[in-house]
Amino acid sequence: MIPVAIDALVSVSTADAIAERVEDAPAKPIALLLGTSSKTASGRPNQFYEARIRAAAELFHDDKVQGILVSGDNATRWYNEPITMQRDLIAAGVPADYITLDYAGFRTLDSVIRAKEVFGQDELIVVSQRFHAARAIFIARHFGIDASGFAARDPEKRHLFGVRAREVLARVAAVLDIVSGREPKFLGERETVRLRDGNDDAV
C-alpha cells in the first residue's frame, strides 16, 4: 500500500500545477525539458520524445518561456540526449541561442537540482508527460523551486500501462532520494542560461 499512497500523494499534490493547454500554462523564465531517447528499443521513433519536443517548442513560440534548458543523459560518446533534443528543437523553430544544454541530467533528481544549483533557476516550467512532470515538480518543490508543468501529449494507450507502472516505483525512489539526501551524480561550475530578451540570466 505504501507505493500506492506515495503515487497518489505525488499526483494529488501537483495536479493543479500542470497545464494541458499552452494558453493555461504560466509564464516562466525557462522550460526544463526532461530527456528521453528519441528512439524506442525497437528503433522506432519514441512518441514520448516527439511530444516533449513539440510541447517545449509550443511554449517558446507562445512566449510562455524565454529559454529552454534541455536536461538529459550523455553517458557515452554514442548516446547524447541533449544534443539530439537541441537539433529537433531547432528544427521546430527554436533558435539555438535560447537553448541551454545540461549534459548531466542522468535522473530526474539530477535534472531538477542542477537546474537550480548549476544553472541558477529557482522558477521554471517542467516539460514532460503529466505523470513524469508531476514527479519532477514534487522533487522541485522540496528543493525550493517554484515549479509548474506543461503536459506533453501521451502516446497511444497501449504504450502507457508498463510506463505508468514503472512510474509508481520511480515515485517511491524519488521520495527515498529526498529522505536520504541523495545528491546528483555531478554538480560542477555554475553555468549561464541565455534568455530571449537578449540578457543573460547570470548565475
Image: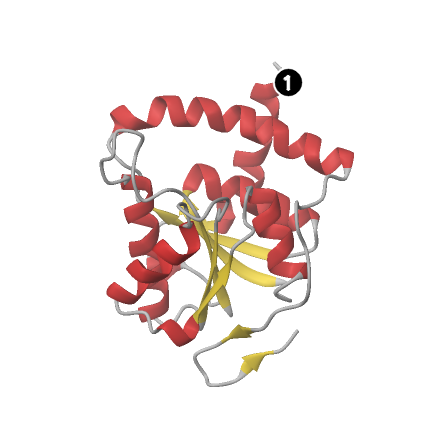
Q: Position of residue 8 (x, y in %)?
A: 55, 28
**Against 132, is 194 above or below?**
below
Horizontal and vertical percent for residue 191?
61, 69
Element carrying mark 1: helix
Q: Is residue 164 above or below residue 108?
A: above
Residue 193 locus on image (x, y percent): 54, 72
Residue depicted at 61% across the width and 27% down the height: 172
Tag 1: Cα neighbours inside 10 Å, few (<14), some, or many (≥20)? few
Q: Is residue 63 left or right of residue 4?
A: left
View extreme (top): residue: 1
Residue for point 45% across, 83% down: 197
| Front position in the image: 162 or 130 | 162
Q: Position of residue 17 (x, y in %)?
A: 51, 50
* Residue 61 in the figure: left or right of residue 146: left
**Which residue carries the number 1 mark?**
2
Q: Quadrant of the C terminus?
A: bottom right
Q: Is residue 8 left or right of residue 80?
A: right
